[in-house]
Amino acid sequence: MISVRISGDPLDLAAEAAALGSDDDTGAVATFLGLCRGEAGRLTGLELEHYPGMAEAEITRIAQAAMERWPVQAIHAVHRHGLVGVGEPIVFVAARSAHRDAAFDAVRFVMDFLKTEAPFWKREHLLDGTTGPWVEAKDADDRARERWAAA
């Protein structure tokens, strides 16, 4: 089972975890929760834009690749769009499997590819009330994704 959602509303973490489901063969659930950082007090939040339809399709494709690579029973991913305040969740990814290694690897794989492949854009909202530039992609994110080619 794969479920993917883009939401303009704050995330209800208990509901998101429950959306992953469970069965008698589930032995592990791994999750990742990404939060909006304040960047040492510079930011009040991030404005997140996405390509509707394409973002969901790309995350689904990434989750399918993870399920083909590891014996994972389910993956659930939800990503925010709109204005997200400092400390608020931006992205939640969870995977369930019979064993922890597969669940951990699948979640990390989904995040590493989501960061570089899914069509999302971030703009900083600064403490002084202005908006900053659109955030550039990071080389570290590309390197994180590339390590899966070697694995």
Image (cartoon, rainbow, N blue to C red):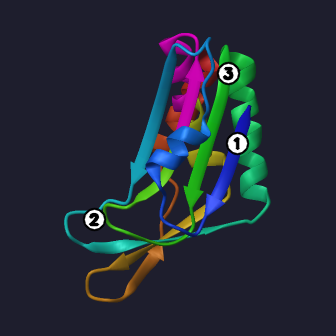
SS under mark 2: loop
Residue 147 falls left or right of residue 88: right
Which residue is pictured at 61% across the width and 13% down the height?
24
User: Of the residues under marks 3 and 2, which one precedes in the sequence?
Assistant: 2
Q: Is residue 113 visible?
A: no
Q: Is residue 68 above or below residue 16?
A: above
- Count of picture labels: 3
Which residue is pictured at 48% across the width and 66% down the height?
135
Determine crowd level at label 2: few under 14, some 14-19, many 20+ residues with C-alpha closer than 10 A.
some
Q: CA distance from mark 3 to mark 2?
A: 35 Å
Q: Is residue 55 visible?
A: yes
User: Of the residues under marks 1 and 3, which one precedes in the sequence?
Assistant: 1
- Quarter of the figure with the N terminus: top right
* Three-letter residue code for mark 2: Gly
Question: Which residue is denoted by mark 2 in the rendering?
Answer: 38
* Three-letter residue code for mark 1: Ser
Q: Among all residues in the image, which is located at the extreme bottom?
A: 129
Q: Which mark is residue 73?
A: 3
In the image, residue 6 lies at what x, y percent?
A: 64, 59
* Three-letter residue code for mark 3: Gln
In the image, residue 84 lies at what x, y percent?
A: 44, 69
Residue 94 lies within the magenta run: yes
Question: Which residue is denoted by mark 1 in the rendering?
Answer: 3
| Span colored in magenta | 93-108
Q: Nearer the viewer, mark 3 or mark 2?
A: 3
